């Protein structure tokens, strides 16, 4: 029974029969989302159709018309009350099961935002994208082709068949093929009245053909499945970009639907396709459930300033990357064990790590770190505990830590206002290439408590983000990189009230202490330029080497502190190439560098008590002792199967002698004479063993030579 409630002038059904929508709404509420009830939206409560069965064969024309209007203008009602998921072998179709991932996809679809989604296998990502395609096919589009792409022709045909099943499962008044005696073929799926067709594609076999795959179309809605495994995927999208931009402009003017959808499990980073897809993902802003609380106007400006200029062409970014793991999708440990058992039976452990754990891993001999350390940090990566939208578009991942004093007036009281956090900043040009990154570290525990990375933070947005962070953490110290693109920031720093909040080394700047006061403008400007050199960290080759040395030490000695999502990802990408430490081709090290700025200032910074940091109170050294203790336990517990009974001093002959001496039955000795076949008594064996145990045997080169000469077989 429906239970429609009005909130802020809008209506929501808290009595829907599809309980997965209620469960997802409750999950969003527990995460602190203010607008947590939006999946329960009812556009026209006066229609009184929430309790109407849309599959009732006896519906009158008026009721059918009202169902059409509500379904067309409110996709949440259509997904909750109308859409069905047919399953082969099942007696009847299922209601769509909403999860946090499918909720994010539907929200992007509703707001005409392209998205890339990554979630474990068998968690219905293809199901939900086909549902969204079905709604667009029935209600949103006319006179267009909807492309569907997969790796192979049989794979895209399978998706097309699934799509056809979803359409034919709808009530007859929604099914455009209900009056046909025979269903349309998978290559000829068309809504004749709307002149809308499904256009199936498989991956290209050359880069030239890739650019022509979707060229010439006007693209409004499309679906590319397993995009991380499709050859030349960036060329496919590059060739289709003009068509996408054209479709988006028309959709904005006419109110049509516009959403390109990409789905995949993590690709193989050892392959060209995996690396290419990863570069696309790195340039795509991350989806945040905090977006649900944005106003329509704020959503409209969500991508302002996000222009990808890499490759010499400017491209407006209008896409989000969505990722949820199995726990966030209500899968339990029993389900995980079943997936592992299947991987164990088939020997496909790499697919298990990628497809179930969403682990983007690589194996390489050029890794900078000990493999044991890398495996440790990869196994202990934390999920962010909360998110903050800086400037309502850049996602700052936050991690729980001990907080004693918070700002109760702040909507995001996640930081201690009395703690002098160290904030490393690595700065890029904001043109879609390298990331501008922030890494926030608690100086007393050296725990990373916040991180942000975006390739679209330009100069003005960088300043705005710094101001917002300064308000969140009133005593934080900023440690920026000051090479090249970081220099313009320093000019603003010197003229702002936050100058004292940026790390400054007075030991290097003798001019600040000896410069005489003068009214000469030129002298003042020269003095200011000189002082600018000593703010932040100017990364010379020597300083970079020092930073990498510090990083290697922390990864080994304090690896339990390196457990955040973005930092671990960048650490995995570091390699040694011709003696130089750098990110693997197509990868980034920007988060690592922001972290290294903090390590460098903390380790070598002059008199940090100026900023309220008392290094004598630091507790992170205790972690090093714990890790060292763990390593020792691992060594002690190691079993050497080559040494009998764990006796390091025993070889084969010594063990045989030991067994003879300790034989309780004196087997092999004559009962009357007490000697064996070689003429020895047990006591003689015992004396010989004691003598061997007392002597320290030293093997010399002459011993080895003699042994080889008499044992030359």
Image (cartoon, rainbow, N blue to C red):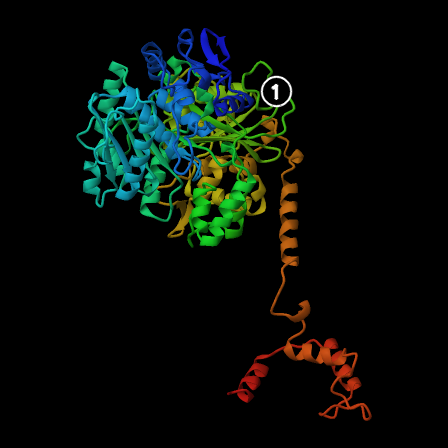
Give the answer, above or below, for where 416 lies relative to 690.
above
**Quadrant of res 413:** top right
Residue 707 placement (x, y as % from top left):
57, 84
Write the residue at 27% across / 37% down: 149
Within-10-Å neighbours for mark 1: few <14, some 14–19, many 20+: some
Name the residue nearer the viewer: 92 or 302.
Answer: 92
**Quadrant of res 257:** top left
Write the residue at 63% across / 55% down: 634
Give the answer, above or below, for where 434 lies relative to 696.
above
Name the residue nearer the viewer: 281 or 253.
Answer: 253
Question: For the view shown, which residue lies furthest in the front direction?
Answer: 58
- Is 187 situated left or right of 286 in this image? left
Name the residue nearer the viewer: 481 or 83.
Answer: 83
Question: For the view shown, which residue lies furthest in the left direction?
Answer: 216
Residue 117 placement (x, y as % from top left):
39, 33
Name the residue nearer the viewer: 406 or 473.
Answer: 406
Q: How many marks do you count on the picture?
A: 1
Can residue 431 be seen here? no
Residue 343 placement (x, y as % from top left):
47, 50
Residue underneath mark 1? 406
- Is 684 situated left or right of 712 in this image? right
Write the residue at 80% across / 85% down: 683
Q: Secondary structure at mark 1?
A: loop
- Is 200 situated left or right of 584 in this image? left
- Is 413 situated left or right of 647 in this image? left
Write the residue at 45% across / 28% down: 97
């Amino acid at each position: 029974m429906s239970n429609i409630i009005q909130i802020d002038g809008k209506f929501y059904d808290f009595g829907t029969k599809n309980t997965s929508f209620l469960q997802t709404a409750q999950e969003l509420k527990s995460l602190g989302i203010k607008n947590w009830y939006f999946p329960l939206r009812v556009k026209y409560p006066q229609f009184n159709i929430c309790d109407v069965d849309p599959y009732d064969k006896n519906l009158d024309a008026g009721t059918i018309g009202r169902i059409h209007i509500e379904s067309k203008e409110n996709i949440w009602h259509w997904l909750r009350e109308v859409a069905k998921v047919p399953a082969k072998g099942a007696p009847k179709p299922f209601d769509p099961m909403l999860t946090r991932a499918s909720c994010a996809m539907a929200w992007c679809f509703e707001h005409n935002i392209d998205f890339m989604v990554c979630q474990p296998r068998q968690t219905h990502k293809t199901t939900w994208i086909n549902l969204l395609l079905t709604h667009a096919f029935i209600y949103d589009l006319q006179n267009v082709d909807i492309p569907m792409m997969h790796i192979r022709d049989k794979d895209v045909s399978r998706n097309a068949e699934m799509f056809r099943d979803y359409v034919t499962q709808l009530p007859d008044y929604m099914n455009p093929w209900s009056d046909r005696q025979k269903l349309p073929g998978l290559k000829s799926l068309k809504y004749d009245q709307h002149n809308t067709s499904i256009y199936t594609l498989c991956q290209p076999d050359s880069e030239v053909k890739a650019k022509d795959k979707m060229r010439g179309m006007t693209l409004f809605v499309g679906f590319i499945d397993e995009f991380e495994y499709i050859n030349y995927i960036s060329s496919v999208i590059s060739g289709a970009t003009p068509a996408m931009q054209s479709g988006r402009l028309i959709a904005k003017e006419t109110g049509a639907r516009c959403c390109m959808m990409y789905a995949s499990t993590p690709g193989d980073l050892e392959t060209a396709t995996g690396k290419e897809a990863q570069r696309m993902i790195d340039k795509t802003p991350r989806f945040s459930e905090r977006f649900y609380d944005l106003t329509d106007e704020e959503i409209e400006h969500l991508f302002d300033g996000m222009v990808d200029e890499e490759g010499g062409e400017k491209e407006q970014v209008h896409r989000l990357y969505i990722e949820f793991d199995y726990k966030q999708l209500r899968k339990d440990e029993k389900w995980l064990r079943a997936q592992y058992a299947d991987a164990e039976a088939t020997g496909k452990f790499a697919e298990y790590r990628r497809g179930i754990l969403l682990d983007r891993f690589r194996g390489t001999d050029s890794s900078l770190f000990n493999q044991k350390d890398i495996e440790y940090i990869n196994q202990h990566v934390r999920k962010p505990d909360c998110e903050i939208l800086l400037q309502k578009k850049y996602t700052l991942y936050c991690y729980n830590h001990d907080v004693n004093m918070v700002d109760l007036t702040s909507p995001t009281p996640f930081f201690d206002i009395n703690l002098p956090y160290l904030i490393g900043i690595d700065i890029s040009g904001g043109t879609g290439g390298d990331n501008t990154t922030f890494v926030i570290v608690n100086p007393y525990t050296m725990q990373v408590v916040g991180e942000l990375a975006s390739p679209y933070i330009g100069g003005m947005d960088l300043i705005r983000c710094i101001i917002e962070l300064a308000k969140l953490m009133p005593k934080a110290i900023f440690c920026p990189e000051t090479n090249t693109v970081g220099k313009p920031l320093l000019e603003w720093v010197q003229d702002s009230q936050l100058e004292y909040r940026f790390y400054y080394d007075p030991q290097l700047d003798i001019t600040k202490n000896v410069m005489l006061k003068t009214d000469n403008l030129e002298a003042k400007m020269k003095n200011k330029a000189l002082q600018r050199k000593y703010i932040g960290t100017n990364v010379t080759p020597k300083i970079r080497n020092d930073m990498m040395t510090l990083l290697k030490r922390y990864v080994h000695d304090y690896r339990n502190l390196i457990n955040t999502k973005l930092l671990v990802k960048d650490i995995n990408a570091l390699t040694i190439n011709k003696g130089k430490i750098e990110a693997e081709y197509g990868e980034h090290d920007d988060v690592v560098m922001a972290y290294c700025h903090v390590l460098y200032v903390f380790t070598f910074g002059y008199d940090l008590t100026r900023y309220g940091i008392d290094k004598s109170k630091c507790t992170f050294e205790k972690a090093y002792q714990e890790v060292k203790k763990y390593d020792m336990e691992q060594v002690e517990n190691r079993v050497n199967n080559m040494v009998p009974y764990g006796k390091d001093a025993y070889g084969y002959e010594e063990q045989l002698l030991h067994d003879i001496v300790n034989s309780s039955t004196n087997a092999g000795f004559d009962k009357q004479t007490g000697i064996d076949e070689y003429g020895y008594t047990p006591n003689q064996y015992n004396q010989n063993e004691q003598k061997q145990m007392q002597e320290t045997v030293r093997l010399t080169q002459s011993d080895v030579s003699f042994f080889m000469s008499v044992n030359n077989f």
